[in-house]
Every structure is written in C-alpha cells, then in structure tokens.
Image (cartoon, rainbow, N blue to C red):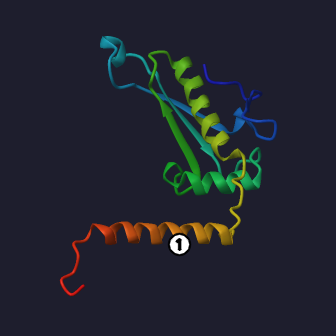
Amino acid sequence: MFPDASEMLDVSPRIRVSCREFSWSAARSSGPGGQNVNKVNSKVILRWSVVQSASLPDDVRARFVATYPRRITIEGDLILSSERYRDQLKNVTDCLDKLRELLLAVAIAPKARRAVKPTKASKRRRLANKRERTETKARRRPPRLDD
C-alpha cells in the first residue's frame, strides 16, 4: 500500500529522496463517505525527518526549514497528511505530490538583490514631476487678497 523502501521521490535532478526515510501511518478520514468513513483508514499521514535526511542538500534543507517552520515539529520532522480521496493509495500519491511541491519551491536559491542607485536622469525626472504637481495644485488655489 505504501511506497517501497527501494523507491525514490524524484523532485529534481539534484534532489532525490529515498522512500526509506518516510514513516507512514493511516487513520480514519473525516468528511463525506457515508458508512465507509467509519470502517476504512483512508487518511494518510507522512512523517519525514527533514533535519536528519541524508538525501537533502544542506542549502535546500536550510531554505526548507526557514520557509516552512510551522510545518516542522520540534524534533525536526515534517508531517503531511492527505484525506482528499476515499482511496488510501491516491492519498499516498497526494502526500508525495505535496512534498514534491514543497521541495520544488525551495530547490532553487533566490537571487541576491543588488542595491542600485537611481540615475541622475531619473532624479531629474522625479524632481520635475514634483515641481509640475506643485504648480498644478498652486493654480487651483484662489488668489490671495494682498496680490
């Protein structure tokens, strides 16, 4: 029912996680399903130790932990669950898809922002626009009595 220990979760060419690192459990799902809900353990819970994973590169692990701190327990485990489908096998693949999406989101390091100074021309344009706006507003005012 659950993935074989020999299988791999392919996220990218650089990130391949062994299914041996995952811990699976099943529970009764909530929601619609009639009497079937009370009998079948279709909800799937995936537990994965992100901090101790040997499959994850260090930079990706650091970004993952920094990006998803609320999803990771104090012990460093990620807990994902799926009860979208009534079928346990579909919920297993849904959990793996969720994990793949989370890993893809942090797989590529964000580009470092370089601070740049505004050009002289852009400064001139900004000040000219401010002057124009000031003059426009000044023309709207009624004339003063002492003029």
Q: Relative to 120, say whether 85 is above or below.
A: above
Report crowding for label 1: few under 14, some 14 to 19, many 20 or more residues within 10 A (C-alpha): few
Q: Position of residue 79 (x, y in %)?
A: 53, 42
Residue 29 location (% of width, % of height):
39, 25
Please provide percent x and percent y for residue 143.
23, 76
- Residue 28 can be seen, yes or no: yes
Left or right of 92: which side holds 4?
right
Residue at the far left: name it: 145
Element under disc 1: helix
The residue lying toward the viewer, choosing from 116 and 41, is 116
Q: Residue 3 vs residue 6: left or right?
A: left
Specify the quadrant that holds the C terminus.
Answer: bottom left
Residue at figure coordinates x 32%, y 69% from the top left: 139
Can see residue 117? no
Name which residue type carries label 1.
Leu
66 lies above or below 33: below
Residue occupying the far front of the picture = 147
Taking 137 as reference, is 52 left or right? Answer: right
Closest to the observer: 134 or 28?
134
Q: Quadrant of the N terminus?
A: top right
| Residue at left offset 36%, top offset 12% | 36
| Residue at screen point 31% across, 12% down | 35
For this orientation, the residue located farthest to the right is 13
In the rendered image of this protein, does residue 100 appear above or below residue 140? Answer: above
> On screen, 26 above or below 22?
above
Between 11 and 46, the one nearer to me in the picture: 11
Q: Residue at x 76, y 48 (%)?
A: 54
Q: Residue furthest bottom?
A: 146
Q: Which residue is mark 1?
A: 127
Choose top left, top right, bottom left or bottom right for residue 55. Answer: top right
Name the one closer to the observer, 88 or 56. 56
